[in-house]
Amino acid sequence: MKPHEIAHRLVSPTHAEIDIQLETDLFWFRGHFAVQPLLPGVAQLDWVMHYATLILVPGYRFHSIQNVKFQAPLLPGNRVTLQLDWQEQKQQLNFSYLRHEGEERHTCSSGKIRLCQ
């Protein structure tokens, strides 16, 4: 299941930003975890691939994860921006999820994924 997308912007042919509202009833929060639901890493990676292949690199697919860091949880009700940066010469997609806190943005997760055609 995909998130509630507020807006997406293609800033350049190699950079996109997608604003997302993490609705409290989102499928991914069910059972992950009972005391404090949080967005699983597998959902975050799924959304990265969904938006990358939809907006930046149609025709590409997942090859391997080069690096991923989960620094802070993404929680129900959070508003986040997913940033995608495509480096064609390396066949590498860099991503980061930034949680909104007023005017500030804090990195919750980031990584590099290798793509192939």
Image (tube, rainbow, N blue to C red):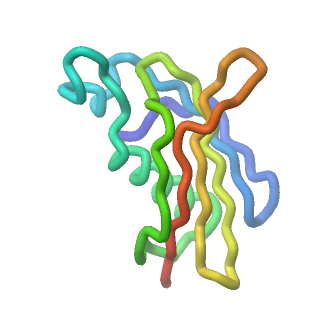
Can you tell which quarter of the image residue 33 is in?
A: top left
Q: Is residue 44 above or below residue 117?
A: above
Q: Is residue 90 above or below residue 49?
A: below
Percent position of residue 72, x then y: 49, 33
Percent position of residue 38, x then y: 35, 28
Quadrant, the N terminus? top left
User: For this view, does 47 lie left or right of residue 42?
Assistant: right
User: For this view, does 107 lie left or right of residue 16?
Assistant: left
Residue at position x 70%, y 52% in the image:
16
Of 108 and 5, the residue lying toward us: 108
User: For this view, does 65 lie left or right of residue 9?
Assistant: left
In the rendered image, the residue lying farthest to the right is 12
Q: Is residue 79 above or below residue 11?
A: above
How many numbered callouts?
0
Q: Is residue 74 above or below residue 103?
A: below
Of 40 and 10, the residue lying toward us: 40
Of 58 and 14, the residue lying toward us: 14
Residue at position x 46%, y 30% in the image:
74
Residue at position x 73%, y 45% in the image:
9
Of 52 and 40, the residue lying toward us: 40
Can you tell which quarter of the image residue 8 is in?
A: top right
Percent position of residue 80, x then y: 59, 31
Percent position of residue 110, x then y: 55, 50
Residue at position x 52%, y 21% in the image:
78
